Image (cartoon, rainbow, N blue to C red):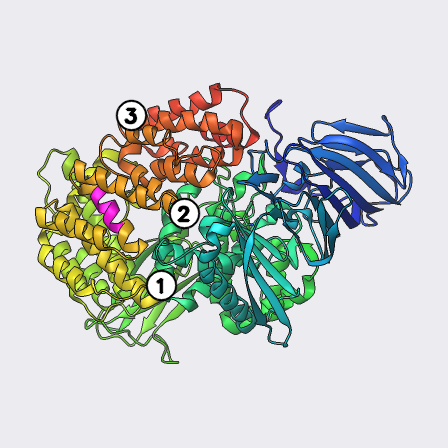
Amino acid sequence: MQDAQPKTIYLKDYQVPDYLVDNTDLHFELEPKATLVKSQLKIRRNPEAGKDLPPLLLDGIDLELLSVAIDGSILSQPTYQVTPQGLSISVEKPEFLLEIHNRINPEDNTSLEGLYLSNDMYCTQCEAEGFRKITFYPDRPDVMSKFTTTIVSPKDHPVLLSNGNQIDSGYCEDGRHFATWEDPFVKPAYLFALVAGDLQHVEDTFTTGSGREVKLQIFTEPKNIGKCDHAMRSLKKAMRWDEEMYGREYDLDIFMVVAVDHFNMGAMENKGLNIFNSACVLASPETATDSAFQRIESIVGHEYFHNWSGNRVTCRDWFQLSLKEGFTVFRDAEFSADMNSRAVKRIEDVSLLRTNQFAEDAGPMAHPVRPDSYMEISNFYTLTVYEKGAEVVRMLHTLLGPEGFRKGSDLYFERHDGCAVTCDDFIVAMEDANQINLTQFRHWYSQAGTPVLDVTDDFDQAKGVYSLKISQSCPSTTDQKDKLPLHIPVKIGLLDQSGNDCVLNSKGNTEEVLEITKSDQVFEFSGFQEKPLPSLLRDFSAPVRVRYPYTEKQLIFLMRHDSDTFNRWDASQRLAFLALSKLQKDYRNGRALQLQPELVEAYRDVLSNTALDPALVAEILRLPSEQSIAEMSDLIDAEAIVVAREFAYKSLAEALFPELWAKYSELNAQKPYDPNAKDIAERSLKNTCLTYLAATEKFEALELVQKQFEAAENMTDSAASLSALINYGDMQKSDSAIQDFYQHWKGDTQVVELWLGLQSSSARNGTLNKIKDLMGHPAFEVRNPNKVRAVIGGFANRNFKQFHKEDGSGFRFVAEQVILLDKLNPQIAARLVVPITRWKKYSKNLSEKMKAALQHVLDAGELSPDVFEVVSKSLK
Ligand code: PHE
Ligand code: ZN
């Protein structure tokens, strides 16, 4: 907890480490409340840092120091000194062996950083700065060392795992047993991992391109052993894909994955021993939804891909986090696109970016992809670093083309293998491999904010010349006022009046990437008889907003004809947004609400278009979420957004009732469950239809929902119908469905999490009180982040209506929970507070109430640096 105001750390202050650690030998004797850690570090003065011998500073938090020795002699104070942040040791020679003994308490570690217990399993989480909660160490990513780890434990924890290869194991005289692991690759401490428990595993093998056999193991608690197959299949696909697309082979003889129930994030790429949040690895057809299946495939891929983009080549300092995360998210997105529907994957990713990352840019914690300062690094595992960072890498891919990009990545891996490097090193590799200059492109790493492209066009009938004028600008962000023009790839096409793509240049291309580098640029296209319609920013080729004065007619035309699937969807979003804005205005002006008939017809058209991928149809039909409407608004009028969207949704449902019913019936085929792209697409559209039908609250529609709920043989159908009952069913039926579902699934942690989330995101009045009751339910566990995220996070992030109640009750509730949670798990608390930090964008009443809730958190005092940073910055 906070002693004084936490310190701000700046990128510009970076200095190379004073000392290096060539070898790290760790010895653990596991006990729930008193684990003994002995470490032997072979330390050497860093020649790059100088020749003098400054004190050796080691990080260490919540550690009980037992002894310190150098080259076998025990030290006494003041040769070493304990500080609140660690240990300072006087040094007399440039090379020595340091031996430290300390004790830690895994059982009471609720922060889930360092070594902790999940159910009865010991596990570690060291990124970013968790290793310092295990032992005293230079806990920074540019100190890379060879690790050997011995774990000693009572036999009730038979499985003992760490990074690399097991080189020894056996029994101790006192009846305990041990295992020793050696990782031949150098790594920073954040990639260290240890697991000990009563675990079972599934096993498989993978033969690499060069013919080496790798053993693959997935470990879980015994009750979950039947839920590992999908992750195993995903892992093997990912390993093959990385060989084919990037020429990267796996490098150890064994690759292990462990599922744990208590985890702050999705998963962690520890060398050779990935640790996963159970929700991101365990699945069976009966218990997991389609989106869970897809999430698992992408996260298994993501963590595996880190073996090269993150582990073999790692970050010099935490400001460079996007070096590994942006690149790896790009890699996993392409992997998922190749395994499933590319267009739908792109739409999902862009929706997330536009709804949440754009909001980050517009909010109090705005920061560039490479931040230049932080108080608490855990707060910077953000959508900007991950998702916008991935978009920046994608733009490089667009600018260089697939071959150029591959040449760049090959050079990057070759040059920096075994090193801790910077985002700039990545760019330099791309430049050198392609002999181009990316000086201006680099601003994407240093400049926060969402750029805006204002596009206008003109047609010279006499000359047959069509011109596009594109101006770029970027609004100020809280961290930076003035912005420089960026290098932006804008992929475009031009449609003729029958909806076909026009030829754009002498090469006969119908698509072109315009490179925007100046504030204003004009691009001309010749040989036209009639004015074409522009399809701008195809495939979302840059993370920007595009403003072009499309009419509703033009948008409907693009929805029908654009050859770029992404832009078809985007046109539907723009169209819906126009309609919803108008409804909001009418509501505020006391006018009767009416949905434009053109919108209804456009939706009818999409629903009946059998040439479209059903998943895409579902994406188009679903209407923008309240959150994304909010993000597109200059001033958020939450109540009007809710009224407008509910009205539009219900009106569409009523107008299209027969078509929705027919589509539902057509797709409701009873076939065995398989999470392949085609079936997932059909279920997605089917359940979208079902939810629309339910929104009419007609008797026969609710009967249909009830029927699906009772007959469902997979979790996708089951959850969709339960959600429809919760939101639209009559109270009694809804309550009994909730109870039945729980009785059936209470033994399954992942399903219970889903069940909690469906209830907390119910738009029904009274949900907040139900949530308070749920927190007393045996299924809720305040120390389990997944449950907290399902209940409190579900409310704050996925229940726009109830969270934004005009009386401020939603904000106050979340603020109270943040204060309580901060004592247990600061990282989780700091994430939960984010939805109330965007108060400046809301209309007066809500804005004041949010601000008061934030002030309440600040006034609680004794905040962690995590929560303090977010709250104090957002109150400025
Ligand atoms: N490095 C992990 C990933 O993105 C995320 C993570 C960060 C997990 C911090 C735990 C703690 O793959
Ligand atoms: Zn990652």
Identified at 23% across, 68% down, the residue is 561
Horizontal side of 137 relative to 276 (left or right) equals right
The structure residue drawn at horizontal position 27% and vertical position 39%, both measured from the top left corner, is 739
Disc 2 and disc 3: Cα gap in Å? 38 Å
Relative to 561, is 809 above or below? above
**Image quarter for residue 295?**
bottom left
Residue that label 3 marks: 845
**Does dot 2 land on a helix, a strand or a loop?**
helix
Q: How far is disc 2 from disc 1 in space, using C-alphas?
A: 17 Å
**Position of residue 261 measured from the top left corner of the image (x, y, whole percent):** 49, 44
Is disc 1 placed on a helix, strand or loop?
loop
- Whether residue 2 is visible to the viewer of this picture, yes or no, is yes
> Given the image, on which type of amino acid does mark 1 rest?
Pro
Q: Are marks 2 and 1 in contact (CB under 8 Å)?
A: no
Whole-percent x, y for residue 642 in the image? 22, 38
Question: Which is in the foreground here, disc 2 or disc 1?
Answer: 2
The quadrant where residue 875 appears: top left
Q: Residue at x 22, y 50 (%)?
A: 709
Magenta region: 720-726
**Residue reaching furthest to the bottom:** 507
Residue 222: where, in percent of width, then height? Answer: 51, 51
Q: Is residue 724 magenta?
A: yes
Amino acid at pointer 3: Asn
- Residue placed under numbered mark 2 in the picture: 750
Q: Is residue 653 left or right of residue 788?
A: left
Q: Earlier in the sequence, mark 1 or mark 3?
A: 1
First in sequence: mark 2 vs mark 1: 1
